[in-house]
Amino acid sequence: MSKEFEAVIFDLDGVICFTDEYHYQAWKAMADGIGVYFDREINNRLRGVSRMASLEIILERCDEKLSDERKEELAAQKNELYKKLLVQMSPADLSDEVRNGLNELRARGYKLAIGSSSKNTPFILKQIGLDGFFDAVSDGNNITKSKPDPEVFLKAAEMLGIAPEKCLVVEDAIAGADAAHAGGMKAACLGDAAKAGAGDYNMTTFGDLLNIL
Ligand code: BG6
Ligand code: MG
């Protein structure tokens, strides 16, 4: 175990598993339903962002001003479609690289937590066979502020009983890396966030974590 870190807080979507395509399909169906343009590039802007904040980004292209009630209805509609797509996820959606990496980090003595904006976190963890695996799960159900606010990571650190500066956050979203930094934590990034150089460590693959920790 490195002296610098005692715990690792993982984002879920885009780090532990890949739900991007399901989010895209569900938002696309919702946007088509109200005649609002939506594409994969806009979908990329939703990474790490809460459900309602994602809807606001999509509605930038909507000429009509919608009531809060209508927005809630559209977000619920998207979530119903999204949950139907999540049902097809299974432990086969957890790669060997991620599974082995998590087991190795646990064997090295690190506390492991989830820090995700998603309210569907418990369901997704169950689908991929990680229900009960993590020492703490902080997710969209116990926060009031979306990344880049650090709330979700600070709550995870608190649940673990470990000081924020002893936690390393693993993220694929720039908003997530910013949230880690705002909470006084270092970030190891993958995907988009790594390409943008948003992390203290910018990795090409999950397994690179084993060289950092
Ligand atoms: C994040 C995703 O993990 O969760 C975002 O990167 C998503 O794209 C957010 O909007 C909220 O997800 P959910 O499942 O609560 O709608
Ligand atoms: Mg993510």
Image (cartoon, rainbow, N blue to C red):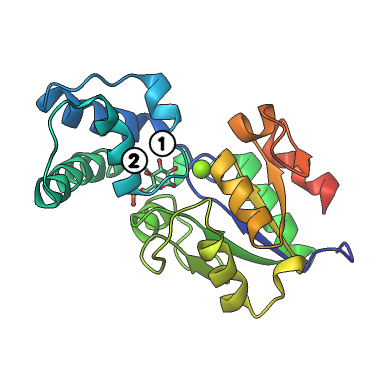
Image quarter where the C terminus lies is bottom right
Which residue is more in the foreground, 158 or 128? 158
Residue that numbered label 1 is attached to: 46
Dot 2 falls on a residue whose secondary structure is: helix
- Beta carbon at label 1 within 8 Å of ligand 1: yes
- Residue 193: % across, % down: 63, 35
Give percent across and percent down for residue 210.
79, 48
Which numbered disc flags the more N-terminal residue, 1 or 2? 1
Disc 2 marks a residue whose amino acid type is Ser
Residue at 13%, 21% (x, y): give it: 35
| Image-based side of 78 in relation to 165, left or right | left
Q: Residue furthest right?
A: 3
Q: Which mark is residue 54?
A: 2
* Residue most extreme to the bottom: 161
Seen in the image, is 143 located left or right of residue 66? Answer: right
Tags 1 and 2 touching, CB below 8 Å: yes
